[in-house]
Image (cartoon, helix red, strand yellow):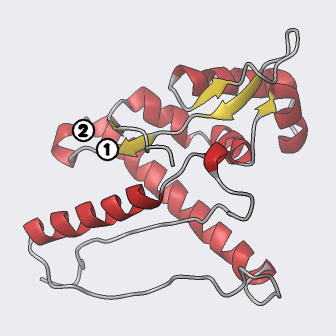
Amino acid sequence: MTTPPQPEDMADPAMLKALVHPLRRRILAELRRGPASATTLAAALERNTGVTSYHLRELERHGFVEEDPALGKGKERWWRRRARNLRVPPARELSPEALKLLGDLRNTEIAEDLASWHRYDQEERFGDSEWADTVAFTRGTLGLTRAEFTQFFDEYKALLKRYWRAQEDMPPEARAVLVRFIAFPDPDGK
C-alpha cells in the first residue's frame, strides 16, 4: 500500500480560487474516473477543447493535475489527478480573502456531497448490488473540550490515513468510497 501524500496547507487565495471554480471542479470529478485529454473532457463536459485545455493548465499550475506522459501521443496531452492531502490552517492564519474563498469552497463541497448522496440514494441504495447496503451513517453529539476535539479529529485523520491507497493500487474489487466528516460546535449550545 502506498503512503498518503504529506499534508499541505490550503492558505493561498489563488489556489483556493482555482479549486472553487465550477468547471474546474467538474474536470477534477471527471479525472477521478481516470486520465483524460482536453478533447475527451470537452466532449464529456460539453465545452470546447480550448476551454478545457485552459482550465487544465490552471489546475496544473496549482498542483491539482499532472500530465500522464504514458498516454499522450504527439501533441495530445493526457491528464490525471494528482493525489494531495490538503489541510486548512487555523482561521487566524488565513487572510480575509482566503477565509471567504474557503467558506465558498466548503459550501460548494457540501452541495456536491449532498448531490452525490442523492444520486446514490435514488440509483443504488435499494438495488441488488453487493454495495447496496454499505452506508456508514451515524449522528451524535459529544461534550468535548477544545483539546479533546483536536484529539478526536487527529484520530479520525489517522484512521483515514491507515486505509488510504493510491488509485493505481486499488484492487479490482475495490470501489471509491466517499468519506465525509463534519463536526462543529452547536451554535445553539454553550
Q: In this view, does 124 lie above or below 161?
A: below
Which mark sits nearer the N-terminus, 2 or 1? 2
The amino acid on which the numbered mark 1 sits, given as a three-letter code, is: Leu
Q: Where is residue 2 in the image (x, y as percent from the top left)?
A: 49, 44
Q: Which residue, given by chain and number where applicable, does mark 1 sit on?
A: 99
Q: Which residue lies furthest to the top in this view?
A: 74
Q: Nearer the viewer, residue 115 or 156?
A: 156
Q: In which quarter of the image is residue 10?
A: top left
SS label for mark 2: loop
Question: Which residue is at 68% across, 76% downward?
Answer: 118
Mark 1 residue crowding within 10 angstroms, few (<14) / some (14–19) / many (20+): some
Q: Is mark 1 on a helix, strand or loop?
A: helix
* Residue 123 rendering spot, x and y as whole percentages: 80, 79
Q: With respect to residue 10, does 32 lie above or below?
A: below
Please identify the quadrant where the C terminus is shown: bottom left
Q: Are marks 2 and 1 in contact (CB under 8 Å)?
A: yes
Which of the 4 image quarters holds residue 12?
top left
Residue at x 77% of width, y 22% of height: 70
Q: In the picture provided, is 106 more to the left or to the right than 58?
A: left
Q: Residue at x 49, y 34 (%)?
A: 17
| Amino acid type shown at disc 2 | Leu
Residue 94's disc number: 2
Query: Residue 71, position in %: x, y?
Result: 81, 24
